[in-house]
């Protein structure tokens, strides 16, 4: 990514533009790291907090030099963010390994009448019945969306834009003061 200007003294112009590019990239890298952490913190604060699994799954990654990916990595994050419409396929089958997170949630979530009557004799069967009931409910009623990722980005966008603009201006001042 270099701009070339062909004028008298073009070698100096090319060197100057390369120096500007390097300074801007250096400042933007530093500022992007900081802004990504701000956005990750906002997503953690806005995420639903049951057992903190979704909030704790928010990570920052760097797929390219001037790019940051911030978002949750939990398997159910997309369903939480976008919701699930009624009539969809619902949950995976009980025996599917993809259902492990939901089964763990059901184990940790007590409900009225748990462990009474026949349920006390067959806890695994009770857990499966609860799972099938939840799957039925999701197929019939859907899941309401809780858009915490989009909301946090909308809230932090002005701050991020100001900080990135200030980083570019700082880089330009540094190059201008050394020229």
Image (spheres, rainbow, N blue to C red):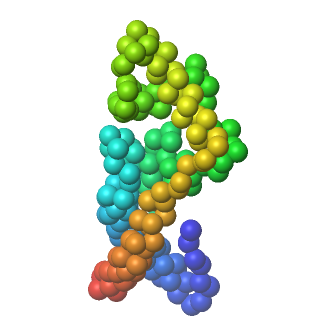
Q: Nearer the viewer, residue 158 or 119?
A: 119
Position of residue 172 measured from the top left corner of the image (x, y, whole percent): 37, 83
On the image, the x and y values in percent for residue 96 come to: 59, 22
Residue lying farthest to the bottom in this orientation: 8
Q: In the picture, which quadrant includes the N terminus?
A: bottom right
Image quarter hosting the C terminus: bottom left
- Give the answer, above or below, for where 60 lies relative to 23: above
Camera sees residue 151? yes
* Left or right: 153 as drawn, with respect to 83: left
Residue found 51% across the figure and 42% down from its top = 76
Query: Please, is residue 24 above or below residue 80 in the view?
Result: below
Residue in the foreground of this view, choosing between 64 and 99: 99
Give the residue displayed 53% in from the left and 56% down from the top.
145
Q: Position of residue 19 (x, y in %)?
A: 42, 74
Question: 15 or 69, which lies in front?
Answer: 69
How many circles with numbers are drawn on the protein? Answer: 0
Above or below residue 74? Residue 95 is above
Q: Residue at x 61, y 47 (%)?
A: 141
Give coordinates of residue 166: x percent, y percent. 35, 81
Residue depicted at x 45% and y 80% = 16
């Amino acid at each position: 990514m270099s701009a070339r200007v062909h004028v008298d003294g073009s070698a100096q112009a090319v060197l100057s533009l390369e120096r500007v590019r390097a300074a801007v990239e250096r400042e933007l890298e530093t500022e992007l790291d900081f802004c990504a952490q701000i956005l990750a913190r906002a997503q953690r604060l806005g995420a639903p907090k049951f057992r903190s699994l979704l909030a704790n799954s928010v990570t920052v990654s760097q797929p390219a030099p001037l790019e940051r990916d911030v978002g949750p990595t939990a398997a159910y994050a997309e369903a939480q963010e976008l919701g699930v419409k009624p009539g969809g396929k619902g949950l995976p089958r009980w025996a599917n390994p993809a259902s492990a997170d939901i089964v763990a949630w059901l184990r940790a979530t007590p409900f009225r009448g748990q462990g009474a009557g026949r349920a006390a004799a067959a806890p695994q069967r009770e857990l499966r019945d609860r799972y099938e009931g939840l799957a039925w409910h999701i197929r019939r009623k859907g899941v309401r969306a809780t858009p915490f990722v989009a909301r946090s980005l909308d809230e932090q966008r002005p701050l991020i834009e100001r900080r990135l603009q200030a980083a570019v201006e700082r880089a330009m001042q540094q190059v201008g003061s050394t020229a």
